[in-house]
Amino acid sequence: MHRPQEPSSGIHPLLAGRFSPYRFDPSAAVDDHALGLLLEAARWAPSAGNSQPWGFFTGRPGEPEHDRILPHLAPSSARWATDAGLLVVTLTRRHVDDTRLLYSEFADYDLGQAIAHMTVQAQAMGLAAHQFRAFDLEGLTKELDPSPGWAIVSMAAVGKAAGEPPEGRARHSVARLRSAPWSPAE
Ligand SMILES: Cc1cc2nc3c(=O)[nH]c(=O)nc-3n(C[C@H](O)[C@H](O)[C@H](O)COP(=O)(O)O)c2cc1C
């Protein structure tokens, strides 16, 4: 596996320098301007048929929205996500109202692109994002009660990283990316 910290790829520094922090600076707030830019970046992501099947619920320390999210973090994510200046709950519109009819077969794919945009925007602003699934999906869904057709998918903690990238970040090789779909399962 290739370690991205070893600069051999030549990709853009915003991408090469990105990592998911396990420590955030609790004194670093995400102000209204920064929050607006993060959502603006997500807004301009591409989506199938320009359907834009994404939605976000945000909370910052001290806001009532933050208090609604915190009890639903898993112990593993609460250790670091609580210190982040911003928590983002990501939602996608998968189904048409209460039916199982797909609104878009690309809904989750499109949401992922919007979050990638937000993540790179965060990096450009000197912030970092750690996406995560370690939360009580059922409990948070009950708490936020999204409209029919909408589903919570993931969360992201965004803030100022405290400390260096964790050890052991590794990636498959480019060759593997091209061969894996035709190789025997590992
Ligand atoms: C959809 C998704 C879910 C994730 N869930 C968790 C999680 O529950 N806990 C966690 O510590 N990291 C989680 N991560 C972060 C990944 O572990 C991390 O992105 C991966 O190890 C690569 O590390 P890097 O982002 O620093 O390059 C998640 C990332 C994504 C995109």
Image (spheres, grey):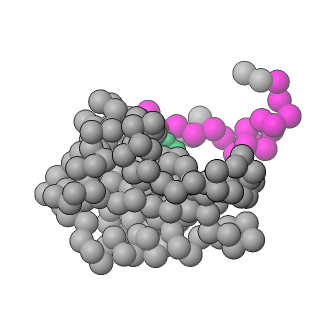
Q: Nearer the viewer, residue 15 or 67?
A: 67
Residue 181 drawn at (x, y percent): 81, 37
* Quadrant of the image containing the C terminus: top right
Q: Nearer the viewer, residue 118 or 161?
A: 118
Whether residue 151 appears in magenta in the rendering, the answer is no
* Quadrant of the image containing the N terminus: top right
Q: Residue furthest top?
A: 186
Horizontally, residue 138 falls left or right of residue 163, namely right
Q: Nearer the viewer, residue 117 or 65?
A: 65
Look at the image and tell me whether residue 62 can be seen: yes
Residue 56 drawn at (x, y percent): 45, 61
Look at the image and tell me whether residue 164 can be seen: no
Residue 60 drawn at (x, y percent): 25, 59
Residue 157 drawn at (x, y percent): 35, 51
Q: Residue at x 20, y 63 (%)?
A: 29
Q: Residue at x 48, y 54 (%)?
A: 146
Q: Residue furthest left?
A: 27
User: Range of the magenta residues?
Assistant: 168-184
Horizontally, residue 78 falls left or right of residue 36, namely left
Whether residue 177 appears in magenta in the rendering, the answer is yes
Q: Residue at x 77, y 23 (%)?
A: 185
